[in-house]
Image (spheres, rainbow, N blue to C red):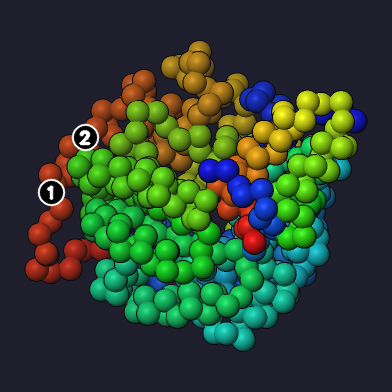
Amino acid sequence: MMYRPPSRRVPHSRMNNEITNPLALIAELTHRCPLHCVYCSNPLELQSRANELDTQAWLRVFQQAAELGVLQADFTGGEPLARTDIPDLVRAARTAGLYVNLITSGLPLDEPKLDALLVAGLDHLQLSFQGAREEIAAEISGTKSHAQKLRVLEWLKSRRVAVTLNFVIHRRNLDQLAEMLAIAESSSATRVEFAHVQYYGWAFANRELLLPTAEQLAASIDFFRRAQERLRGKIRVEYVVPDYHAKYPKPCMGGWGRKLMLITPSGEALPCHAAKIIPGLKFENVKDRSLREIWEISEAFQKFRGEAWMQEPCKTCDRRALDFGGCRCQALLLAGDPAATDPVCTLAPTREKVDALLAAIPKAPEPKALTTPAWLYRPNPAT
Amino acid sequence: MQPDPNSHPHLAPGCRLGENNQQCVLLMPERALRLNGPSLEIVRRCDGKHSVQQIIAELQQIYSKAEPERVETDILGYLSLLQEQRALDFA
């Protein structure tokens, strides 16, 4: 037999203009949530329960996604456990051939519910944290939630499922990194994610209170490097830096319409979480069209796919195959044009807007505030 | 980090074989690895029954035309990569 060294990754087309199949389906099952996080990635306009897709519609979506070549389904929300049919959805996605991730606050969980999910075939549970302590978690989520998360971690220790802890970090909790990591180390997690807030939706509205200082950011990167080194082979430590502080933009969603498809609670198919803020884009609904049709020919998925839409400096930039021009929603939010170069890029003509935001950050984190900051909390959708 | 030749690797929770476009893949949290000939032969043997040493011996037999040292180095490198990805536990 011919010998070739073992392969190390899933090859995905490097050609920007070629249609590849999506690898992940983000299933936003509901916008209902017991938490009210000030940086929630849901849109400002939340979908009501009455508009949610029914069980049968989701079953069809999972089947079509698997046929399209999708490998992983991310169940998210809102709080996906707010849906009572969640074990049926897990079972259906798994039966269709998908790897099933559940991204949850853990609030609605108890041991029987957890076991029902595992029996249904859940592969990976991702538990989100708002901090390392009860007070900050309550301030950020507008709910008492921290103690329940620690209980969930105890239940997970005796059960066979992959566990990731996800800490969303920002100026108000960056001084708790060591405590956060200690929570991960005392759990059964094999992966911990430290994600700096990304500034869209609710986070965009609250960004002046959330943006980290340059000193905090530098210290955090140093902390993550040391943690990765120390925990190598035990826990995968991953971090997402806030892109306002970066030199080049992130390859948002791995490129528009290249790897990911998001389905909203009401069945609209989006190329990313925030795409609905882009004016003039028409989104198809899974109730009317197949996933394949939407992926291959819908206007929304084609709009910023490939390179034809690019302006200078992206159009002729060597980095365009690496970052795809950055994030379209950020270009809209900060430069007022979704086809502009992501203003985070130091080559962008609009970078000064990002620099101005960074310059406005207080030099040191506020001393213990006397009053709670004026957060804009994410409410619950109408019924 | 080199795996102990006498240890028995097995897939960690949440890691399993799957299929995509008629190709075998190793599915794990937030990631998937496409498995070609040798990598599939290695991962198939990460069942808690084969020791690292046995996996090396069996692959050297399957790929008898390749240099045995090369096969051994590749396997050890691949197993430690999978461990860093937290796709493997060693018993």
| Residue identified by numbered label 2 | A356
Q: Is residue A171 left or right of residue A31?
A: left
User: Which residue is the extreme one toward the right?
Assistant: A1
Q: Few, some or many C-alpha atoms within 10 Å of disc 1 (few <14, some 14-19, many ≥20)?
A: few
Q: Nearer the viewer, mark 1 or mark 2?
A: 1
The answer to which quarter of the image holds residue A346 is top left
The answer to which quarter of the image holds residue A185 is bottom left
The amino acid marked with disc number 1 is Ala
Q: Chain of mark 1?
A: A
> Where does the image place residue A161, in percent across and percent down from the top left?
62, 68
Q: Is residue A136 left or right of residue A200?
A: left
The answer to which quarter of the image holds residue A167 is bottom left
Q: Is residue A46 left or right of residue B28?
A: left
The amino acid marked with disc number 2 is Ala
- Residue drawn 34% across and 33% down? A246
N-terminal of the two: label 1 or label 2? Answer: 2
- Residue drawn 29% across and 53% down? A170
Nearest the viewer among A60 and A212 is A212
Residue A351's disc number: none
Q: Chain of mark 2?
A: A
As measured in the structure, the alpha-carbon distance from the residue carrying label 1 to the one carrying label 2 is 17 Å
> Where does the image place residue A318, in percent across and percent down from the top left?
50, 16
Quadrant where the image shows the N terminus of chain A: top right
Q: Is residue A224 above or below residue A348?
A: below
> Where does the image place residue A333, in percent across and percent down from the top left?
38, 40
Residue A364's disc number: 1
- Residue drawn 45% across and 60% down? A166
> Where does the image place residue A8, in percent across and percent down from the top left?
66, 36
SS for dot 2 = helix
- Residue drawn 51% across and 68% down? A188
